[in-house]
Amino acid sequence: MSDHHHHHHSHIRVENPPKVSVGPKSVTNACKMILKAMPPWKAFKLLQKLNQKKGIDCPGCAWPDPEKRSKLGEFCENGVKAIAEEAQHKLADAAFFKHYTIDSLRKKSDYWLGQQGRLAQPMIKRPDNARYQPIEWDDAFQLIGQHLKGLDHPDRAVFYTSGRTSNEAAFLYQLFVRKLGTNNLPDCSNMCHESSGVALTETVGIGKGSVTLEDFEHAEVILIFGQNPGTNHPRMLNSLEKAKKKGAKIIVINPLKEVALLKFKNPQKIIGWTGSGTDIADLYLQIKINQDVALLKAWMKLLLEDEDGLDQVFIQEKTRDIEALKADLSSYSIDELIAQTGLAKEDVIESAEWLKSKSKIIACWAMGLTQHVNAVDNIREIVNLLLMKGSIGKPGAGTCPVRGHSNVQGDRTMGIWERPTKAWTDKLKETFNFTPPETPGYNVVESIEAMNKGKVSFFMALGGNLLPAAPDTLLTEQALKKCELTVHLSTKLNRTHLATGSTSLILPCLGRTDKHIQSGKEQMVTVENSMGMVHSSIGVLTPPSQALKSEPEIVASIASATLGDKDINWSSLVEDYDNIRDLIAKAIVGFEDYNARLRKDNGFELPNGARIGEFNTSSKKAHFTINKLAESIPEGHVYTMMTIRSHDQFNTTIYGNDDRYRGVFGGRNVVFMNEGDMKKEGLSKADTVELFNNYGIERRIVGFEVIPYDIPSGCLATYFPEANPLVPLHLFARKSHTPASKSVGVNVKKV
Ligand SMILES: Nc1nc2c(c(=O)[nH]1)N[C@H]1C(S)=C(S)[C@@H](COP(=O)(O)OP(=O)(O)OC[C@H]3O[C@@H](n4cnc5c(=O)[nH]c(N)nc54)[C@H](O)[C@@H]3O)O[C@H]1N2
Ligand SMILES: Nc1nc2c(c(=O)[nH]1)N[C@H]1C(S)=C(S)[C@@H](COP(=O)(O)OP(=O)(O)OC[C@H]3O[C@@H](n4cnc5c(=O)[nH]c(N)nc54)[C@H](O)[C@@H]3O)O[C@H]1N2
Ligand SMILES: [Mo]
C-alpha cells in the first residue's frame, strides 16, 4: 500500500500495555473524537439516541442491546468513533475531486482518505480521465442500466455488499440482482464469519449463533476464542462482567493477552471509574496461533476419560455419530496435543475440570477462529465439545459467533448470499413470479479471480472497501482495474474508489445517523443483531449534503434503469419503506406481519431451532464431526502471522495511528514479535524489517518496525489492512473460502 515509510528513524512510541481497559480514558478519547468532527449540540443529540429504543442502531458492531438501556446511552468508545467518522461536517465534494488526480489520491494513506469528509455528490471517472468529475444522478443510473442491459451474460456482473447496509436496501438489491439473472452476490461475510455459517449449518442446522443476551446471566462457563471484545465489541464486556457477578467462570483462548479480557472498568457505572476494575478471565490460555483444534481435542479426551461430565441423555436423543468421534480421538495422545498448543499441561487439565463439572457452557468466537485454512474445522470442533456437554438448546448455554458489521447477519437473512438455498429461490419465485438463477455465484475470492481473468466487466459495491479488505492487495487492485464499469455506493472516500475500471462511479449515500426522508415522510430502516433480534434504526441528523440519496432509493433507481418498472414497481417501493417491508414479510419466513411487529417496542426475535434444541439438519439431529489438526505452514517459512485490528480502526477505516491497549502509539507498520524469536533473528526493538513469503510467487512488504511483545514463539502479529499484500488469494478456508488471514506463513528479514 502507499503509506510513506520513514526508514531513517522511528516515530512510533511503544509503552507497556495498560493493566486495565475502558474506564475514564475511553470516555475522554471518545469525546475528543466526536468533538473534532461536530459541534457539541450535535454530538449530544447523537449520543442520546444511540442504541436506544426507537433510536439509531450503532454502526459500530453487532453486539445486542440489553432490555434495560443505560440512561447514559448504550455506547462505547469505538461506537462513538464510528459515528464521529460518519457524521463529519467536512465534505469531499466536486471542488475536492477537482483538486486531486486519482493517482495523487492513491498515494495518500487510508487515514488521510477517511479524513476528507463525507462524499457529497455523484462523481464519475470517464475513460482516459485522470479525475472524478460531477455527474447527475439520472445520468449515472442510465449509464449503469445501459451497461447491464448490454452484457452478453448477467454472470459478467458482480454485486458486492458490506454489512452496514439495512435490511431494506439488502432485500431490494438481491431481488434486483437475481431478477437480472445472477447469484454473483459476494459480501464481507465471505471474509468474516462464513466459516461459522458453514460449520453451524452442517452440524446444528442453523448458520447463526444460538444464545441470547440473557443466556450470559445463566452461564456457568464462558469460553472466548479468538476475539478481542475490548476493542471490537466493547459492550460485550458489560455482559461478561454481569456473568462474572453471577458466578460464571471465563476462559480466554488467545495468543495475545488482550487487556480488556484481563481487567475491565465499566464506563457506564461511576463506581467502575474509581475502583480497580473487574477481572474478566479466570484462566487465560495463551495458545499458539491456529492450535485451537489441538486444545479442543485435548479437552474432549480428558472429558472422555470417565465420561462423568457427558450429557448422555442429550447425546442419545439429540445427536448422532459420537462413536466415530470417540474412535478418532483415541488415535491422538494428550501430551502431544497439549505440546502443540504451547500451553501448560496443568492449565489444560484445570480448565477441563471446569468443563467437566459444569453443564451450562457458552462458546464465543470471532476472527481468531474463522480466518484459517482449517477454520470450519475449528468451529465444528467447538460444536463437538458443546454437544458432549448437552450445552446447546437450553438456557445459559450455546454457540455465540460474535458478528462484525452491525447488520451483516441481517443482510444474509435478506438473501445477500452467492449460494441461495432451494427454499430461498422457490419462495422468491412464488412471491415475484420469475425464475431466479440456481447456480451458485462468485464469493469474494472467486469474484477477484474472475475479474482478473477478464470474466467480469462490471463491479458494484453496496458499501464496504473491498480492495484493502481483500487478500492479495496488489492482485485485487489489478482485478478491479480490469472491469469496464465500477460502481460504489459509499458514505466516505476509500481506496477501492481509486482502483477504477475504465469508467467508475461514486454514488454517495445517507448513513445510519442521517434522517431518511422519502416523499416528505421520515423513514426508518431495520437491522438484525448478532443474536437474531430484528429492530428499527432511525437517523436523527440533517444529511451533510442535499444531493445524497438513501441506499434503498439508489438500488431501486438502478433496478428501474436496468429492468424497467413493469414487473416490480421499484420507484413506488421506496416511496415508503413499509412497502419494501411488506414484500419482505411475504418472501421471508419469520418476517410475517413485519411492519406491525417492528413497531411494537423492541422489535422481535427470529426463529432459531438450535436455541430450543431443534436441529434442522439432514437427519434432524445435531452431528458430531471428525476434524483434522491444523496443517503446518509451507516449508521454508518460519513464522505464522495473524493480521489483527488495532484499537483505532474500523476494518479499513483508520481512526488514528494508536493502539492504546497494546501500548503502541503513532504508527501502524509494526510487527509484534516474541523476544526469544527476536534474539534468534538478531533483532532489537525498533529495528526495521521486511516480511515476505512464497506461496507459488513471492510476496513482500517493507518498512515494518519490530515490537517485542508477549506472544508465543513462532507467532507474529501485524495489522489488517497493512499486511494484506502478504495474504495469498488462494489461501482460504476449506468449504467456506474465507481468506486465511490469521495464519499466513512468513519470514522476517532485517534491513
Ligand atoms: N472498533 C472496531 N469494532 C469492530 C471492528 C473494527 O475493526 N473496529 N470490526 C468489526 C468486524 S467486521 C469484525 S468481524 C469484528 C472482529 O472482531 P475480532 O475477531 O475480535 O477482531 P480481530 O482483531 O481480527 O481479532 C482477532 C483476535 O483473535 C486472536 N487470534 C488470532 N489468531 C488466533 C488463533 O489462531 N486462535 C485464537 N484462539 N485466537 C486467535 C487475536 O489475538 C485477536 O485477539 O469486530 C467488529 N467490530
Ligand atoms: N488481513 C485481514 N483482512 C481482513 C480481515 C482481517 O481480520 N484480516 N477482516 C475481514 C472482515 S472480518 C471483514 S468484515 C472485511 C471488511 O470489509 P468491508 O466491509 O468491505 O470494509 P469496511 O472497511 O468495513 O468498509 C468501509 C467503507 O464502507 C463505506 N460505508 C460506511 N458506512 C456506510 C453506509 O452506511 N453505507 C454505505 N453504502 N457505505 C458505507 C465507507 O465508504 C467505508 O470506506 O475485511 C476482511 N479483511
Ligand atoms: Mo467482519
Image (spheres, rainbow, N blue to C red):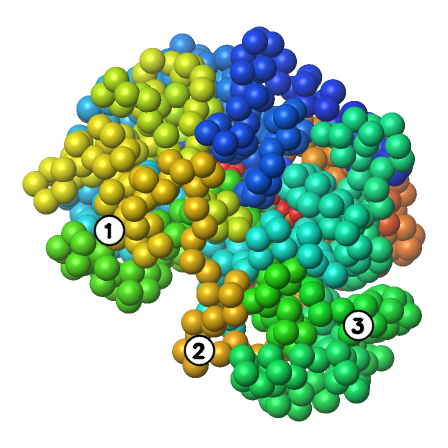
Nearest the camera: 687 or 135?
135
Q: Position of residue 184 (x, y in %)?
A: 32, 53
Q: Which element is circle 3 on?
A: helix
Q: Nearer the viewer, residue 2 or 86?
A: 86
Quadrant, the N terminus: top right
Is 302 placed above or below 231 here?
Answer: below
Q: Are marks 3 and 2 in contact (CB under 8 Å)?
A: no
Is residue 382 shown above or below 645? Answer: below
Q: Which mark is residue 586?
A: 1
Measuring from the top left, give residue 25's x and y in whole percent. Answer: 78, 25
Kindly identify the amino acid type of the residue bearing the numbered disc 2: Lys
Which quarter of the figure has residue 107?
A: top right
Instruction: Give the mark, 2 or 1, whose residue is nearer the N terminus.
Output: 1
Tell me which residue sits at (47%, 71%) in the image.
Answer: 614
Task: Tell me, for residue 357, which label it has, or none.
Answer: 3
Asked whether the viewer can see residue 245, the reply is yes
Mark 2, residue position: 620
Task: State which quadrant residue 667 falls in.
Answer: top right
Q: Residues under labels 1 and 3: Cα distance?
A: 47 Å
